[in-house]
Amino acid sequence: MGSKDISKIMTKVLIVFFAFVVIAIGIALFINRDRLPSQDLSEERCEQNNAQYLNSELSVEERVDDLLGRMNEWEKIGQMVLVEKNSIRNLEDIQRYNIGALLSGGGAGPKRNNEPLSWLEMINDFQAETKKTCLKIPLLYGIDAVHGHANVLGATIFPHFIGLGATNDADLVRRVAEATAEEMAATGIYWNFAPNLDVAKDIRWGKTYETFGSDTARVSRLGEAYLHGLQDSSTDYYQVLANPKHFIGGGSMQYGTSRNKDFKVEEGNFTLNEEELRRVHLVPFANAVDEGARVIMVGTASWNGTINAANSRLLTEILKEELGFTGFVVSDWYGVYQVAPTRYESLVTTINAGIDMVMTPFEYKDFMSNMQTAIANGDISQERLDDAVRRILRVKFEAGLFDRPEATVEGLSVIGSEKHHAIALEAVRKSQVLLKNTNAALPISASAKKIIVSGSSANNLGRQAGGWTSEWQGIDGDTSITGTTILEGIKSVVSEHTSVEYNQNGDFADGSPLADVGIVVVGEKPYAEGWGDNPNPKLSEEDLLAIKKTKTKSNKLVVIIVAGRPLDISAYSADWDAVVASWLPGAFGGGVADVLFGIYPFTGVLPIGWDI
Ligand code: BGC
Ligand code: BGC
């Protein structure tokens, strides 16, 4: 065979090979094609100019009845899905699938940048897609603005809930929520995945700082205040929807029971009898329902072995029937898909148990087709479908989504306003808890001659802010936050004759005299959720060393702990003159300095047990 023949054969082989590849791709595309049902987009059905549901003079129930009566099954199913916005590759999918709700996961902002304007434009672009659908049902857009609208550049960053718990000041908590809601609404977002009403019983849990602490009554009272702060408004609709979470019992999950191999507590199990569950964990939720909660998020905990999202006793019998909850129940991140081996079975089980909206949060196409099948098979009844959709639509009308004017550029000026900063600063001051004060170490005199400052959290806004800031897990040393570090706060309150020297590691020049006071600001690196589960929350070696070095260079030693939970300091604290629990104060470190120097008194009270 000549080389010509060989090359001919090779060419043929290549042609056959490419043809095969092309056919294979074609088959794959055919199998995975979107099986969209043909939608009746006729003018007759979609011309809604005189539709009753658009008439804001009618009652919410009349509007819901009218709208529900116009919807086909595909449109109804679309209302039940909550999709993470980064899973929407093609904006058009919002109309093709009639998607009813989107969320930003932690840190998931606009593609362009994190400026408020980009957020506003992003939300308005999403909403614009729904206007192309037949019934033009607005999207509900949700976000974790759990300590301010902290995904957005320049937003006011408040202390995390554990610090608000320490303030024990319901009026203040209400104002924090109100300010948060104003900043959210400015970007066109009307649904906050807050307040967290978990009652934290184990500080090893990474979500401890997201709670108001371990006392049921306090969680209930502050949760109520927060809910009103978000929702109350001078108009007929809510300012922003509150979303008590995580129903229920997560604060009692046992260490080591997590279903997730990366976690210890989160996604774990708790063992309680129903009477205890009601006494410790149900009270704040029952109260929130009485006070007007319209959305409840079900967490990922299991109660005596059953995942909450699959528990009809909890969701239907107790929450909906006994407590009379008429809003909708939303599942947590990937929460329903953990209950059974297949997504189909998971959906059937959890929706029948009482979940109304599913935070998929990714595979919405698959959700839509599984739901169609489940309804066709009679595994999910028409009544259950209608009940879920009715609840969701009811809340959409109540939230004013069909009536309220679109957020505008002019409104963005409330973001990071002086007024909101002042509320945040007040919250920081009131959240500081004095754990120990000997040798009259505190308050520090503003005219002290020499103050030395050290520690990993002294000059670090990322650590002050913690998780759920800029990113889901927060950012150690985040430079995008507008605010003051504790070090800057100290510098701004001392007299002009005071020298303030800072060295993170406590490496100060030898020499006398000793500093009047050494202040060491130590603490945790930012974290969130299961990634923050920790068998033994304690100080780092680096911080302990900074404390040791600073002590030798100062007359009195004050240790400030910036952490989302109590840290074990029992082996060391006897050597320190004063100890302050700062929690995760957020962007305004000046509030810490204000109480250290006695400009304001310490009024914070422990939200959770801490033996020092
Ligand atoms: C958390 C919720 C949060 C949701 C959306 C979940 O992992 O448990 O608290 O609201 O994600 O970000
Ligand atoms: C998201 C969070 C969510 C978490 C749950 C993250 O990727 O950003 O919002 O709570 O996943 O695992």
Image: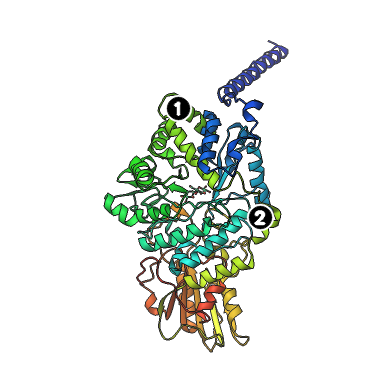
Within the image, what quadrant is residue 102 found in? Answer: top right
Tell me: is circle 2 under 8 Å from ligand 2: no
Circle 2 Cα neighbour tier, 10 Å, few/some/many (<14 / 14–19 / ≥20): many
Q: Quadrant of the N terminus?
A: top right
Quick one: which residue is furthest to the right in this view?
4
- Residue pictured at 52% horizontal, 43% vertical: 60
Q: Quadrant of the C terminus?
A: bottom left
Question: Number of labelled discs?
Answer: 2
- Residue pictured at 34% horizontal, 42% vertical: 317
* Amino acid, disc 1: Ile
Frontmost of labels 1 and 2 is 1
The residue that disc 2 covers is 116
Of residues 550 and 266, the one nearer the viewer is 266
Label drawn at residue 200: none
Vertical order, 106 against 592 (above or below) = above
Do we see residue 475 in this rendering? no
Circle 1 Cα neighbour tier, 10 Å, few/some/many (<14 / 14–19 / ≥20): some
Q: Considering the numbered disc 2 on the image, is that residue within a helix, a strand or a loop?
A: helix
* Amino acid, disc 2: Pro
Give whichever of discs 1 and 2 has the lower sequence position: 2
Q: What's the coloring here?
A: rainbow
CA gap between label 1 and label 2 equals 41 Å
Q: Position of residue 483 (x, y in %)?
A: 61, 67
- Residue pictured at 39% horizontal, 70% vertical: 569
Within the image, what quadrant is residue 439 found in? Answer: bottom left
Q: Position of residue 124 (x, y in %)?
A: 66, 45
Q: Position of residue 44 (x, y in %)?
A: 64, 26
Is 59 left, or right, of 416 in this rendering?
left
Vertical order, 1 against 580 (above or below) = above
Label drawn at residue 375: 1
Q: Considering the numbered disc 1 on the image, is that residue within a helix, a strand or a loop?
A: helix
